[in-house]
Image: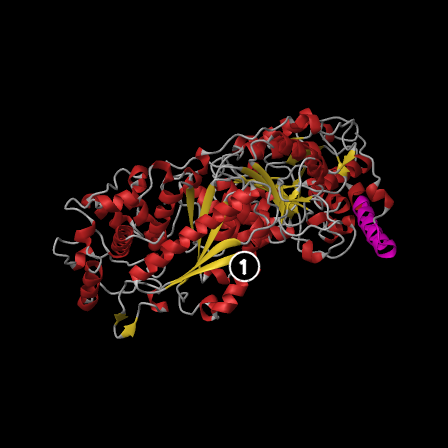
Amino acid sequence: MPLSDGELSVLNRWWRAANYLSVGQIYLLGNPASDGKLPAELIKPRLLGHWGTTPGLNLLWAHLCRVIGRSDRDVLFVCGPGHGGPGMVASAWLEGSYTEAYPAITRDREGMGRLFRQFSFPGGIPSHAAPTTPGSIHEGGELGYSLAHAYGAAFDNPNLLVACVIGDGEAETGPLAAAWHSTKFINPAADGAVLPILHLNGYKIANPTVLSRIGRDELTSLLEGYGHRPWFVEGDQPDEVHRALASALDEIVEEIARIQAAARHGETRRPRWPALVLVTPKGWTGPKVVDGKPMEGTWRAHQVPLSEVRTNAEHRAQLEAWLASYRPDELFDEQGRPSPDIAALAPDGVRRMGATPYANGGKLTRELELPDFRSRGVEVSEPGQPVAEPTRVLGRWLRDVIAANAATRNFRLIGPDETASNRLDAVYDVTNKVWEAAVLATDEHLATDGRVMEILSEHTCQGWLEGYLLTGRHGLFNCYEAFTHIVDSMFNQHAKWLEESSAVTWRRPVPSLTYLLSSHVWRQDHNGFSHQDPGFIDLVVNKRASVVRVYLPPDANCLLSVADHCLRSRNYVNVIVAGKQPGPSWLTMEDAVLHCTRGLGIWEWASGNGEGEIAGDPDVVMACCGDIPTLETLAAVSLLRHHLPQLQVRVVNVVDLMRLEPESEHPHGLSDRDFDTVFTTDRPVVFAYHGYPWLIHRLTYRRTNHDNIHVRGFNEQGTTTTPFDMVMLNDLDRFHLVMDVIDRVPSLGSRAADLRQEMADRRVEARAWTREYGEDMPEVNNWQWPG
């Protein structure tokens, strides 16, 4: 049905009101005088924010309110140009959801003044659509992630429509480009729908945008190639744009409903989903010319069109005229409240986009059914036996997790084509990989529905999972360790979101983002140097202690215990580093649970001297963190027991890396007293660590015995070689660890020098063997822990 004059009037009045409120937030410390005059002291001393994209966002919010009223469905607004934050705040205030979240920001003249003052002001709110913004799951401070977030929110939410506004600058980023392929992964029978809205306003900060400068036919072909059927709405005359946009959205919503109904009645063909291209001027309705230069419709409108309002009377007069152009006296009553017809455009209750629980996912979170991981553990007959593949053991438990939560459909396993490579393929016993594109007879485990998602874009994987978690569901991201760096910046943004969210009282905790990093640095022997980098941990530890957790389980049973803990947690980023290759199993399940609960501990069964005696104070502490460092440490201890039986050794294994920090720095940190009890106050500590060695120094630099801590780790030495040669390249091998002990225990006497030479010779022999035969020496892989 065409837009009626009454509907047109209300939509335009909402849009004008939202634009007025947006300009006020950018410029003003309070409400203008009744005559509209703006004294200099009413202007903010620092003008911050982005006007250029905001009028388009306000337009879309108004029309989506109409869509909700007509279609009776839930809509989540994902604002890709998150720097258009004043628009989302203005619209949430108009619909009342902002005042419900912040009662002091009342919907009247006084509250409007507070709304203006707080924006981009000390002690107020940021300029982006941050966690403080009702209705937002996406800040958009860093561009590129909106579409992946939108699809993540739509998965397993069959009644949800996610309206994802994509700025045309954002559309130039790699993550956004890959996310268009999400059309091949969304199931219209079981998932919600995403409506991508490409907002072409023509410019970035200082340059034209690529997609605004190509022909309509080329842009149409691009969107069709991604699997969309595009609708175009273009113009700069408000009434014409309102009518065209309303008509397009009516058709689009009807088409989405048709697609979903067909799929839910058995249609299996992949649909061509609608997409909307909205072409409007940048900075629409703002100043057209400033200081003799064109402003509206150019890159100059990107941020603050009038930049010297406090000191420049001409600019201040232009701002007065700009605000007056919206005729606020027609939009707000004498008390500053939105006119009744404007307020009535907003949907009721939780249907308002600022109040939707989908943007506050903790309200919707349902606990995972987690089967007892103990039943999937490895039976350990003695330390080091049996040999097991930790992630394969984990995969069998994840299979049980998926089966236990099949009915609720609230868990997904996501990764870049590496589920089987990382030995998690037991999950295919109970589920498939989601795949909506063509399937060949030679394919395996592909189906239109499943709990596993794989696409060879780490950005898209993480974006999907973030959207899924932020709307209240659960998941696990498995990835090769070295290539988790691809999402470094996405991790940063999500960690910041969680940190800010924890301070927002109305936001509920959401399930944690958990990474499983496998195919790690020490066992990437066949792929070589490009696949050898453990530095993601260093990046993670940079974040606030309230958000991050890092675990390096030494064997399969510990991995199960850690994974269970992480999937139960809320509002964290958990990083688990675990190997997929066969390795020794050190702890029984009972001991593994106790060890992981403590986070670190003395392995008394591995400590003492060659006669099995344990003295009160050791001669040396052998510490380890990570599966390969643990193996090399225990192999070194085995050599020390044989060659230096009188030496008292204490073995300390670290699972929870954050236990090394002081308790003042991290909730998991050890007290100084406990740290000194474990690591001593004056004995040498030889620490074998999975990653870059300086991280251990950074975490322990305040400790009493820090000067005696000597760390071996990855020193950026890598190539295509054998696993043991990798540890020798980085001086983390058992022979080098023995030499470190010899160098740091002066009481060993004359036998020490001979043993040091023997260890050096054996290292040379081991490397020569590798170069000659292309494999590790048999004794390296067949050593027996003397128990």
Magenta stretch: give its range: 754-775
**Front one among 141 and 699:** 141
Residue 576 lies in what quarter of the image? Answer: top right
Counting the numbered discs, the total is: 1
Residue reaching furthest to the left: 35
Is 765 one of the magenta-colored residues? yes
Is 549 one of the magenta-colored residues? no
Tell me the crowding category of disc 1: few under 14, some 14 to 19, or many 20 or more residues within 10 angstroms, Cα based: some
Mainly helix, strand or loop, the magenta region? helix
**Front one among 374 and 86:** 86
658 left or right of 107 in image: right
350 left or right of 613 in image: left
| Depicted 725 relative to depicted 685: above or below | below
What residue appears at the point 41 percent right and 52 percent down from the top-left corner? Answer: 249
Amino acid type, residue under disc 1 in the picture = Ala
Residue reaching furthest to the bottom: 292
Q: Give the labeled residue for mark 1.
A: 177
| Depicted 705 relative to depicted 286: above or below | above
Q: Is residue 540 visible?
A: no
Residue 288 lies in what quarter of the image? Answer: bottom left
Image coords of residue 155 (percent x, y): 53, 43
Image coords of residue 138 (percent x, y): 44, 48
Residue 286 lies in what quarter of the image? Answer: bottom left
Q: Is residue 147 visible?
A: yes
Image coords of residue 346 (percent x, y): 31, 43
Residue reaching furthest to the front: 1
Question: How does the figure colour the protein chain or chains?
Answer: secondary structure
